[in-house]
């Protein structure tokens, strides 16, 4: 009898992709530390490599639906997080936007898009994939 580890599908990441993901984490941490320390220039500069690598990772993993969904959610998370940071850096975080919210809380839009992508994946796509495996 085979153990679950013997029958489980293996997902391997090329070393170059892993290095890029690790570099992505470094840039992301520098961006968030800069936000915390109110180092505006460095924080804003770190948005570009952080978001660029997230987009590249998303593009490279686009053929694997689970990876695409999660990496798209990360892109929208970084976008929302970066917008929020800049709203605080430039002082429009507390500026009213209409009668409902303020500048900082507009970050809910990209956060919500990322969440919607994951909800779609877990509620629609993943169950569909599971049904396809069973019917094969």
Image: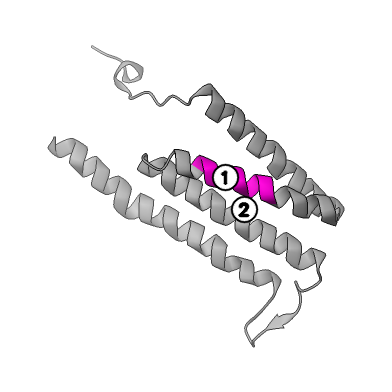
- Name the residue at the bottom extreme: 99
2 or 1: tag closer to the N-terminus? 1
Over which residues does the magenta segment extend?
A: 48-57
Query: Label 2 to label 1, Cα distance in Å?
Result: 8 Å
Q: Are marks 2 and 1 in contact (CB under 8 Å)?
A: yes
Screen quadrant of the C terminus: top left
Between circles 2 and 1, the one closer to the viewer is 1
- Name the residue at the left extreme: 135
Q: Which mark is residue 78?
A: 2
Q: Is residue 75 found inside the magenta-colored segment of the image? A: no
Image position, residue 125 (x, y; %):
31, 50
Q: Tell me the SS state at disc 1.
A: helix
Q: Tell me the SS state at disc 2.
A: helix
Screen quadrant of the N terminus: top left
Image position, residue 38 (x, y; %):
86, 55
Image position, residue 109 (x, y; %):
55, 68
Q: Quadrant of residue 26?
A: top right
| Residue 28 as seen in the image, left or right of residue 119 | right
Give the labeled residue for mark 1: 54
Q: Main secondary structure of the magenta part?
A: helix
In the displayed structure, 13 sits above or below 108; it is above
Q: Residues within 10 Å of mark 2 (few under 14, many from 20)?
A: many
Report the residue at 61% width, 57% height from top. 79
Report the residue at 75% width, 48% height from top. 31
Report the residue at 79% width, 46% height from top. 33
Q: Residues within 10 Å of mark 1 (few under 14, many from 20)?
A: many
Q: Is residue 53 found inside the magenta-colored segment of the image? A: yes
Report the residue at 61% width, 47% height from top. 52
């Amino acid at each position: 009898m085979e153990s679950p580890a013997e029958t489980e599908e293996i997902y391997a990441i090329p070393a170059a992709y892993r290095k890029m993901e690790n570099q992505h984490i470094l840039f992301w941490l520098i961006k968030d530390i800069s936000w915390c320390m109110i180092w505006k220039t460095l924080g804003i500069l770190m948005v570009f490599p952080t978001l660029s690598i997230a987009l590249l990772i998303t593009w490279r993993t686009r053929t694997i639906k689970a990876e695409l969904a999660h990496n798209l959610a990360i892109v929208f998370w970084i976008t929302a997080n970066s917008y929020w940071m800049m709203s605080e850096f430039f002082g429009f975080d507390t500026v009213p936007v209409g009668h409902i919210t303020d500048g900082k809380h507009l970050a809910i839009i990209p956060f919500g898009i990322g969440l919607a992508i994951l909800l779609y994946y877990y509620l629609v796509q993943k169950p569909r994939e599971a049904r396809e495996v069973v019917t094969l």
